[in-house]
Image (spheres, rainbow, N blue to C red):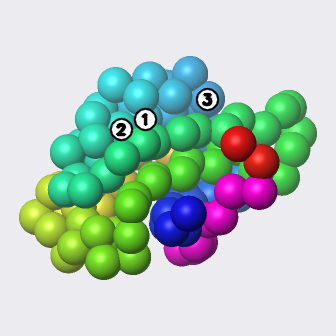
Amino acid sequence: MTPSVKLSVMYLGQPADPAAFDAYYWETHLPTVRRWPGIRRITVARGGPGDEYYQIADLWFDSRADLDAALASPERKVSADDVKRFPEFRGQIKRQIFEVRSYWP
């Protein structure tokens, strides 16, 4: 099986107002990400109260070439500009690319 690739966006810290952050993230930001060319799936994992990471969003692609094309696209620029409009987030937003292979179905 060919490995897939994901871009993980890790939210280390907490939003000042979780309800406002979540509403903006799900209703405004994620729809911009959904328009990236070649994106196959978006998953968001949420931490618990007091956890180091508020959430981790994984953006899935079939290949590194597909991810690279998405990162260079005008649609990605829209998403990057939108991050500047997020409600206050107290912490860091980190990004890392991973190659993913499945061990179990």
Considering every residue shown, the one lying at the far left of the view is 74
| Mark 3 crowd level (few <14, some 14–19, many ≥20, 10 Å Cα) | some
Amino acid type, label 3: Pro
- Circle 3 or circle 1, nearest the eye: 1
- Circle 1 or circle 2, nearest the eye: 2
Q: Is residue 94 visible?
A: no
Q: Residue at x 86, y 44 (%)?
A: 51
Amino acid type, label 1: Tyr
Residue bearing mark 3:
18
Whether the magenta-drawn stretch holds residue 11 is answered as no
Q: What is the number of the mark on residue 25?
A: 1
Indicate left or right for 66 with 75 as reference: right
Against 97, residue 18 (above or below) is: above
Against 82, residue 67 (above or below) is: below
Camera-nearest residue between 93 and 46: 46
Q: What segment is highlighted magenta in the picture?
A: 96-103
Mark earlier in primary sequence (2, 3):
3
| Mark 1 crowd level (few <14, some 14–19, many ≥20, 10 Å Cα) | some
Residue bearing mark 2:
30
